[in-house]
Image: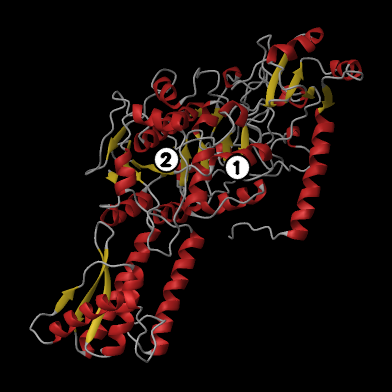
Amino acid sequence: MEITRRNFKESLGAVYGAVEEADFLAIDGEFSGISDGPSVSALTNGMDTPEERYAKLRKHSMDFLLFQFGLCTFRYDQAQSKYLTKSFNFYIFPKPFSRTSPDIKFICQSSSIDFLASQGFDFNKVFRSGIPYLNQDEEAQLREQYEERRNQMNGSGTPSYISPLSGKGPVNVPDEHKDFINRVVEKVEALLNNSEKTVDLEPCSGFQRKLIFQTLNWKYPKGLHVETVETEKKERFIQVSKVDEEERRRIEQQKQEREQEELNDAVGFSRVIHAISKSGKLVVGHNMLLDVMHTIHQFYCPLPEELDDFKEVTMCVFPRLLDTKLMASTQPFKDLITNTSLAELEKQLKEKPFKAPKVGCSEGFQCYDTAAEQLHEAGYDAYITGLCFVSMANYLGSFLTPPRAHISARSKLIEPFYNKLFLMRVVDIPYLNISGPDLQPKRDHVLYVTFPKEWKTSDLYQLFSAFGNIQVSWIDDTSAFVSLSQLEQVQIAMNTSQYAESYRIQTYADYMQSKQKSTSKNRKWAEDGWANTTCSHMHNRSLTGKRSISPTQEDQTSDFGVADSNWSHYTKKIKTDAGGSGGCGQTYAVDSTTDSWLKPQPGEAAVSTSPAQGEAGSEEADAWPELPANQNQGSQATSTGLFDVPQVW
C-alpha cells in the first residue's frame, strides 16, 4: 500500500491494525545521502570502536533525510501454515505545519539521488505529497503554543480574530496604507447592508492583515467574524463574515477543533513509529544501524552525543531489534551464505539447505513479486528482509529434535540475535550491542601511524615490508592503523621508528590513552561551560588471505573459534523433553568433539526476557541454552547468556 499525505489519515487505521496483529515487523528506509564529508570507506574505518563509529554516523549522516519508509507486517496463519503480509510504502517530507512550526533543513548527496533516480524513485511524491512529521520536542512546543493562544483568548474574552496588539482606541494607520484600509472598510459596510453572508478581501501582506484585524475590531466589536484563509498556492487573504453571538461561538469552537486536528496531522508519520514502539513487537531490518538512527533522530528526538545514551533511547523506542545481515554473517549461516547483500541473500535463502518461506499477501494489500526485483523501494526491501528472517529462523528449527518446519518470531531460538546491529567493515567488532556492553577486543598487534599527506598505501606497505603481511585502515590523509600479523613484531617496529623524522608510530594502547585524555579534557570543559542535553525517556582479510582475528579472539577459539564453532560439526541435535514446558525441563546433547555450546549455565534456566514472553504458547518453548561467558567482553561485561559474541569472523 502506497501512502502519501493525501491518504495518510484514512490509512492510519489499517497501519495500526496491521502492527497490532503482526508476529513481527520488517522495516527499511531510503535516504537523501549517507555521508556529508568523508567517503564511506573513511566513514567506516576498519579499526573504529563502537563509540567512534556512532560519533561519525551521528556527525556526518543525520543531516540527510529519511524520505521513504518501508514497513511490512508478518502474521503467521496456523490454518494455512504460512505468513500473511501487509506492506506499506510511506513517502515522508517535513512540510511546515505553520509559520511557527520547524522549517527543517536537510542536505542531499548527488550519488545517492542519482542512484535512486536510476531505480525509478519518484521524488515528486516526496516533495509534493510527503507525509509531515514532528519529533516529541517539536510536538510539545507546538501544543504549548496552541494552549497559550487558547488561554489568552479565554482570559480576555475576545474572539480569535482579534490581534493581541490591538488596542481600545482608533488604529494608527500609516499614510501609505490609509487608502487600502478605507477600501476594506467600504467593503465591510457594504456587506453589513446587503444580504450576503461573507466577503473575501484581496490578498495582502502580513502587516496589512494586522491593520485590518485591528481596524475591524475597533470599528465593529460585535457582529463580525474575521479570519485569515490560505489558498493552495500559499496566498493569504482575509474573509469577513456576518455572525450573531451564538454563531460566532460555534465558529470559534469549530476553529479550535480544526486547529487541534491540524496539530495531530502535523505529528504525521511519527504516529506510525509511536505505534511500532508501543507494540513491543520484534522489528527486523537489514544492516539497519542507519535506519534506526535516522528513525529516532527524525521522529523522536535528536540523537544524544554519547553512545550509551543512544542505546538507552533505542531500547525505549525499539525494545527488540534483529539485523538480518548480522544473522546471515553468523554461525550457523555464515558458512552457507556467500553474499549477505539483501538481494543476493534473498536468492540464496531459497536454495538448499534453506527453504523459501510460504507467504501470501492479506486481502486488499499489494503482493510483491520477488522475480520483478523492486529493489530500493522501501516497502519491497522491508518485505524481502522479512522473507530472509523467516527462512533463517525456520532453518534453526532443523536443529531441534524432532525438527520443526516453522519457528516463531517469539521463539527463544531467535533471542540470541536480539538487539545486535551489524557494524560494517570493522575488523574485530562485528556488531553494536544495543542492550549491553560492546566487545572490547585486544588490539595489541595494531599500530597508529602518522605521516606526510603525500603518502599512499604503497608507502605504508614499503615502510613495513620487513614485517610481512600487514593490513592498513586509513583514518584520514595523514594517519592510519597498521595491523601486523605477529604480536612480537610490534616492539621491533617501535624500536626501528625511534629516530624517524617523516613519520611517527604509536601502539594502539598509547593512541587510545592519549585520545581518552583529550576527550576527558573536552568533556570537563563542556560540563563547566555548557549544558549537555540528552533525550528524555567486510570481512577485512590480511594479505595472506587468513581471517583477521584479534589476539583476544584467538585465545577464545576453543569456545568460539572459526574451526570449533561451525554448526556443521554437530552430529547430534537438540532434544526437547516432551514433559517440559515453557522452555524448562529440557535436555541437550551435542557432538562430543566440540564444546557444549548449547549448555545452560549451572543453576539457570533458559528464560526469555523479551516483552512478548507471556504471549508465547507451547510452540514458543524452544529454549536456547546458554554458552559459556565470553572473555572478549572485558572486565566490565557480565555475560548472562548465549550469543554475547555471535561468531561472524
Residue occupying image coordinates x 77% and y 45%: 519
Using the image, tell me which numbered label, if any, was put on residue 584.
none
Can residue 585 be seen in the rendering of this structure? no
Residue occupying image coordinates x 79% and y 12%: 463
Q: Is residue 546 left or right of residue 163?
A: right
Locate residue 487, reporting x and y percent.
83, 18
Q: Is residue 565 above or below residue 271?
A: above
Q: Residue furthest left?
A: 195
Q: In the picture, residue 350 is in which quadrant?
A: top left
Locate residue 89, reporting x and y percent.
33, 42
Say which of 480 and 2 sits in front.
480
Amino acid carrying label 1: it is Lys
Mark 2 in CB contact with mark 1 (< 8 angstroms): no
Q: In the picture, residue 274 is in which quadrant?
A: bottom left
To which residue does mark 1 refer? 59
Can residue 598 be seen in the rendering of this structure? yes
**Quick one: label 2, few (<14), some, or many (20+) residues within 10 Å?**
many
Locate residue 357, reporting x and y percent.
36, 29
Quadrant for the N terminus, please: top left
Q: In the picture, residue 179 is in which quadrant?
A: bottom left
User: Element type at marker 2?
Assistant: strand
* Colouring: secondary structure
Q: Earlier in the sequence, mark 2 or mark 1?
A: 2
Quadrant for the C terminus, please: top right
Say which of 610 and 30 sits in front.
30
Say which of 542 and 235 sits in front.
235
To which residue does mark 2 refer? 26
